[in-house]
Image (tube, rainbow, N blue to C red):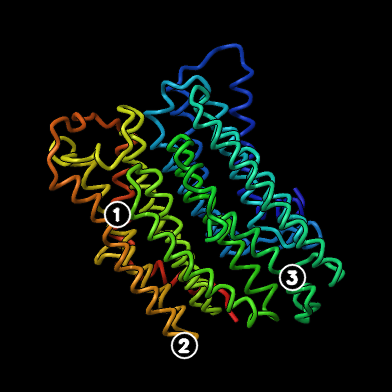
């Protein structure tokens, strides 16, 4: 095998591995023998674990296809964070999927979405980015409709398709204006052709609006709660964690590397969006009773805190965002994992249903509590360290009004996170959720999330490693 072919396989390792898993599942599907769901789930989780472990080996920097595809150690880390999150979601979905009729189809759609995200993260060209975005979005809409017998699930898919089509249209219009004003689509050349003209700023606003839709930034968040509530909980977990993380990885790279010449303009835009997102996300989260809608507005608020870190425009800004998203994987998936398990068995999803939950299910109650503490940024959970670094990155610009507003919003968020904890530990319930037996795989996933929430904040080499790979102005 030639050196060029070897280099191709190494640089596209993540994409090729996911594509191979999709083909294996396709061959199983078209085979004559019907596999039992438990067997399929066991095989898929082993393949996903192998895929995650393989992400640590044979990594290399390089470009392919005329600089339209690029790989660095930071990009490989980002992809493996997504691999980890997908593996956790898969193990958490065991209880729901073991009785589902379309297990293989679920994983083929899920991995097709992940493959699109990988291409998007590695894009060195706006057209490659757009193709990766579409490859990731279309299967995700089908996943939202995976509870085929529920009308809410169909409505969620329709709302996601409509909002995604609108945001993709804005992105494509912005891309066409960028190309028209600069004559290139390559990230490496674009920054040299940006002069801050009115046309280019308008194009950037369109691109920013498209990204804001994808990561649920106010005022582009209106689809989020309805889609989260109507989708199956594992799909909601994927939307909340993996999808947002993928778009944020690309968003930071595009801002810092491509649109650096117009940084003064987009800094002010990010300030406004971050404050709006934190405040409105908090206000709506306080009013929620359905836990999926509650976690939806919680995730919107988290995006506001992330934008504070992004606004730092520094190496610490990049590192703090990636570090926080790693913590966010464990925190949010811990919370969604408990909600998914309870929902799959009992169908209960409201905060009132969780009253006296600790008395019957102490393990699940503690995992959910740790996750909520981490999302709230309560020490000594990892979420506290994640938000601390985001605020420190934002403080690098000396905008102490923004930092003060972020800190106040952290205090406000304590109210609604602790409201759920109070319901589980302190409130009485004549008919609490019965004692639930947690299967081995979901239990392992929840333990990993709980350990991640506790340990990551104290393992300082993790942040140091991310910082060493990061980029800034």
Q: Residues within 10 Å of mark 1 (few under 14, many from 20)?
A: many
Find residue 188 and report its image quarter.
bottom right
Pick whichever, 381 or 209, lies toward us.
209
**Label 3–label 2 contact, CB within 8 A:** no
Find residue 430 and report its image quarter.
top left
Q: Is residue 316 left or right of residue 198?
A: left
SS under mark 3:
helix
Q: Position of residue 122 (x, y in %)?
A: 66, 58
Mark 3 or 1, which is nearer the eye?
3
Q: CA distance from mark 3 to mark 1?
A: 39 Å
Instruction: Please report the residue visible at 58 percent of the width from the left and 39 percent of the height from the top.
Output: 111
Q: Earlier in the sequence, mark 3 or mark 1?
A: 3
SS under mark 2:
loop
Q: Position of residue 339 (x, y in %)?
A: 33, 39
Q: Earlier in the sequence, mark 1 or mark 2?
A: 1
To which residue does mark 1 refer?
372
Q: Position of residue 65 (x, y in %)?
A: 79, 56
Q: Is residue 53 visible?
A: no
Which numbered dot is residue 398? 2
SS under mark 1:
helix
To which residue does mark 3 refer?
202
């Amino acid at each position: 095998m030639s050196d060029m072919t070897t280099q191709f396989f190494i640089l596209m390792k993540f994409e090729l591995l996911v594509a191979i898993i999709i083909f294996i599942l396709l061959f199983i599907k078209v085979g004559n023998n019907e596999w039992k769901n438990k067997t399929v789930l066991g095989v898929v989780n082993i393949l996903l674990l192998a895929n995650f472990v393989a992400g640590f080996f044979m990594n290399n920097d390089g470009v392919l296809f005329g600089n339209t595809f690029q790989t660095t150690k930071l990009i490989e880390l980002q992809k493996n964070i997504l691999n980890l999150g997908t593996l956790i979601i898969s193990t958490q979905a065991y209880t729901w999927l073991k009785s589902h009729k379309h297990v293989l189809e679920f994983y083929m759609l899920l991995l097709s979405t992940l493959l699109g995200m990988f291409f998007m993260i590695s894009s060195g060209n706006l057209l490659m980015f757009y193709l990766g975005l579409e490859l990731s979005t279309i299967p995700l809409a089908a996943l939202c409709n995976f509870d085929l017998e529920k009308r809410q699930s169909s409505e969620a898919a329709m709302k996601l398709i409509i909002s995604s089509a609108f945001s993709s249209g804005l992105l494509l219009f912005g891309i066409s204006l960028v190309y028209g004003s600069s004559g290139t689509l390559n990230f490496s050349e674009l920054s040299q052709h940006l002069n801050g003209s009115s046309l280019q700023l308008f194009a950037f606003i369109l691109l920013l609006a498209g990204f804001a839709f994808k990561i649920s930034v106010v005022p582009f968040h209106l689809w989020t709660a309805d889609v989260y509530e109507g989708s199956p909980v594992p799909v909601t977990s994927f939307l909340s964690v993996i999808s947002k993380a993928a778009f944020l990885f690309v968003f930071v790279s595009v801002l810092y590397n491509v649109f650096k010449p117009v940084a003064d303009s987009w800094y002010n835009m990010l300030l406004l969006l971050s404050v709006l997102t934190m405040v409105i996300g908090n206000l709506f989260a306080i009013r929620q009773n359905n836990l999926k809608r509650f976690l939806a507005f919680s995730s919107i608020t988290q995006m506001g805190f992330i934008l504070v870190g992004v606004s730092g425009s520094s190496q610490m800004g990049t590192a703090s965002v990636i570090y926080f998203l790693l913590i966010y994987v464990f925190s949010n998936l811990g919370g969604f994992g408990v909600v998914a398990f309870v929902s799959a068995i009992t169908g209960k999803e409201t905060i009132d249903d969780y009253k006296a939950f600790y008395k019957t299910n102490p393990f699940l109650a503690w995992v959910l509590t740790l996750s909520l503490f981490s999302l709230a940024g309560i020490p000594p959970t990892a979420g506290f360290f994640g938000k601390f670094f985001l605020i420190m990155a934002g403080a690098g610009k000396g905008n102490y009004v923004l930092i003060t507003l972020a800190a106040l919003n952290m205090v406000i968020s304590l109210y609604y996170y602790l409201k759920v904890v109070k319901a589980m530990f302190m409130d009485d319930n004549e008919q609490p959720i019965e004692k639930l037996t947690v299967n081995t795989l979901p239990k392992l996933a929840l333990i990993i999330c709980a350990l991640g929430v506790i340990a990551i904040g104290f393992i300082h080499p993790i942040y140091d490693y991310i910082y060493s790979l990061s980029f800034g102005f």
